[in-house]
Amino acid sequence: MYDALLLVSFGAPEGFDQVEPFLKRITEGKNIPPDRLNEIAERYKTVGGISPLNSNIRNLKQQLEIELANRNIEIPIFIGHRNAEPLIDETVNEMKTKGISKCLTWLASPYSSYSSCRQYTENIKDACSKIGADAPHIDQIRRHHDHPGLIEPAADCLRAALQELPSGEETALLFSAHSLPVSMAEACQYEAEIHESASLVANLVDPENLFRKEVVWQSRSGSPSVPWLEPDINDKIKELASDGVKALAVSPIGFPVENFEILWDLDHEAANHAAALGMSFSRAKTINDDPRFVSMIGDLLCERTGEPTLAKAGLGDFSSELEKCEKSCCLSK
């Protein structure tokens, strides 16, 4: 029986004083030029050095506490971030101190890749190794890219975004996710899962197939010589403009919880690029703590404990039912 739930995310700064330590942490060992770090720091300063990610995870924790209490599940919920306080190491040690022996962990990305899945499990394993034999045993909740608790609220958010656009204009629906190096994407189902999630949302929003639909990628980094998943959202916007598309509704399908990359890459760069090309632009809200999303996490926990669930496990063709990742999946390249 599990006696705790751990919510894990990338983490983000929550003030000017946290931006530099945060950037140093995420770029450690990657030989990033100082001018590039300064450029990214300046971007954070445009929003006061604050990303909404950490506060959204805290809000999600609060709603989950209510959800689990309503299901008569009495276990504590912890938060651990890879790159911000509280760090995963600190939280795992706190759980040990509080006598937690067996814990389930939920990762803030529902998609499988080294960056969005395996790397977090390695971080957790390393944290437990530092503690030794007294460390809690931590299992991972399965991937859930096609769960109705994700798909249905994402569809509602995209519908609302569509309503903000002028009627009668040729419109395209864009589904955006974080790009990956192609070599990393070839070692996992990330790309296929993003496409399936986008398709499931599109089928709910546009069952009559009235709009053009595209999966696009954002937030690429690293050497330009390394191929990443394409098309980049800004390249696609330019192409659509040349094809006569006048309006764009963008779903950040790759990010259920709002973060800085959405604010910068979509709300700033993509929106400004579209405006410069004379296109209307509307970005769908993220799911964050939508009650259906909260209920989904409760269901994923109940799947592992043998308790009743409230929704169908998955809507797609290759819904994951793995309780433990295979050794060969989601390699770094």
Image (cartoon, grey):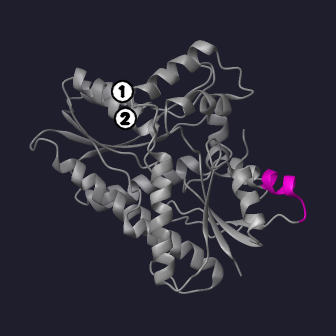
Q: Is residue 310 above or below residue 233?
A: below
Q: Please identify the dominant SS of the magenta region.
A: helix
Using a 10 Å C-alpha cutoff, classify the residue at mark 2 as few (fewer than 14 neighbours), some (14 to 19) or many (20 or more). Answer: many
Q: State the residue in front, 178 or 84.
A: 84
Is label 1 in contact with label 2 (beta carbons under 8 Å)? yes
The disc label shown at residue 269, or none: 1
Residue 11 location, x and y as percent? Answer: 57, 44
Amino acid type shown at disc 2: Leu
Location of residue 77 in the rendering, given as x and y in whole percent from the top left corner: 59, 67
At mark 1, the secondary structure is helix
Task: Pick whichever, 193 or 255, lies toward us.
Answer: 255
What residue do we see at 85% from left, 57% from top? 131
Please state which amino acid type lies under the numbered disc 1. Answer: Glu
Report whether 330 appears left or right of 110.
right
State which region is magenta.
125-133
Residue 197, given in percent of the width and then of the height, sits at 44, 56
